[in-house]
Image (tube, rainbow, N blue to C red):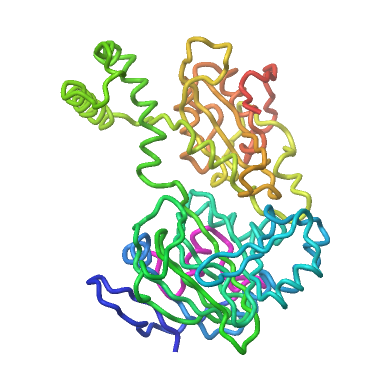
Amino acid sequence: MPKKVKPAGDGKEEGPVPCKQVKLEAAGGPSPLNLDSPSGLFESLISPVKTETFFKEFWEQKPLLIQRDDPVLATYYRSLFRLSDLKSLCSRGMYYGRDVNVCRCVNGKKKVLNKDGKVHFLQLRKDFDQKRATIQFHQPQRFKDELWRIQEKLECYFGSLVGSNVYITPAGSQGLPPHYDDVEVFILQLEGEKHWRLYHPTVPLAREYSLEAEDRIGRPAHEFTLKPGDLLYFPRGTVHQADTPSGLAHSTHVTISTYQSSSWGDFLLDTIPGLVFDTAKADVELRAGIPRQLLLQVETTAVATRKLSGFLRMLADRLEGTRELLSADMKKDFAMNRLPPYYVGDGAELSTPGGQLPGLDSTVRLQFRDHVVLTVGPDQDPSDETREKMVYIYHSLKNRRDTHMMGNEETESHGLRFPLSHIDALKQIWNSSAISVKDLKLTTDEEKQSLVTSWPCVLTEVHRRKNSKLLNVPEGDKNRTS
């Protein structure tokens, strides 16, 4: 019978408890997951657990195990990534460290068995068979279309980057020692079986990855074996280790992870500087100088602490009435580094506008809404010394799939900037399923048309009155960020 792990809340160990059997139906195609929408995908991914239940009882709190006896789902999971896929992937030019890690857990320690330079499949398979090494393949969504399709939808659902790694471990072996991660983790078992042990966190909702010694973590809180089609979720900070049972075939699983550096603390670090900047412009107290020699003190003085406490209360009061928080980096970084929308073919429709540009008599709508972010921030033009606030629209339509989540790869932002006076019109477009260009809250017709013709990849025309004409508005690069 399928089971669901229900971690104890009172410190006692608690085993798996029964849950309803999972049965997923195919959703209009070869995938048994519902890929019609981000919410539909997540609902089908954790079925039969309801989304509301998941976020109320499990998310950031305790592990969830869903064991399934569904041949259709198991076959689909196997198609996401197989050991046999490595031969063709290696022929495309994979490198140790960047694309592939080879490792084994020996006496509680991680032993890295990487070679130098390019990965050759025969050598990789030799290490796998003879050294019983685990093969870790980094970010397979760069090459496997169905994982791209899944992770792109999950990035829309969570509003956070979603990465993945595949782990292939031979029978009777373990790749990694006990450790915890700084991400929310969803494990999909693809091939074979994997024996898991989960332990109570030593650092709940950890902000960094760390190894843990066996003598520090105690007995497992949960212990079970995953089979193809099964799903396991656990929060960041959950200590875990996993091995492939002896006498069986190899195990392949994919770890889908999200919510790295997406805590309230991170959001405060991102938004508070802008709030301080705005408040200092309006309040002379924040522009007054700090006491002489304050920076030379070993300890912060009581006077300085009281002053800072008062400023924080002032900022809290100001925050209560603020609708536009200035995001310094988080929104932009998300838009820059996420996957582009999933497409079949060359994706020309994402970057090449078709048909006529919208006119004053047009009705327009925002397309790829889940791939567009709007934020307010100081002007990033180095020639503008006034640093006036601007509205920035960033999108991921031109992002590169092949560099997704690779860290050291160069990325660039794609989008536009507008004067702050355009914020109400932009919100109209954002909050409407479709809107007439004439109804936009801008002073002149030229401003209205300039707004809707400046981002043709993101804004599309849905209707135009007959015999309407475009105004002769010159196209300029002033508004473009890239």
Residue 345, percent from left and from top: 78, 54
Foreground pick, 140 / 146: 140
Q: Is residue 126 magenta?
A: no
Q: Is residue 35 magenta?
A: yes
- 441 relative position to 466: left or right: left
Residue 224, percent from left and from top: 45, 81
Residue 190, percent from left and from top: 61, 75
Q: Give the number of callouts.
A: 0
Q: Is residue 170 above or below residue 152?
A: below
Q: Identify the residue at horizontal 56%, vertical 64% (top origin).
A: 110
Main SS type for the magenta part? loop
Q: Which region is colored magenta? A: 26-51
Q: Is residue 263 above or below residue 187?
A: above
Residue located farthest toward the front when viewing the structure as drawn: 107
Residue 97, percent from left and from top: 67, 54
Q: Identify the residue at horizontal 47%, vertical 50% (top origin).
A: 260
Foreground pick, 1 / 355: 1
Q: Quadrant of the C terminus?
A: top right
Question: Where is residue 8, by image quadrant?
Answer: bottom left
Foreground pick, 55 / 240: 240
Question: Where is residue 112, by image quadrant?
Answer: bottom right
Q: Quadrant of the N terminus?
A: bottom left
Q: Is residue 174 above or below residue 267?
A: below
Foreground pick, 365 / 116: 116
- 480 relative position to 272: left or right: right
Q: Identify the residue at horizontal 53%, vertical 86% (top origin).
A: 69
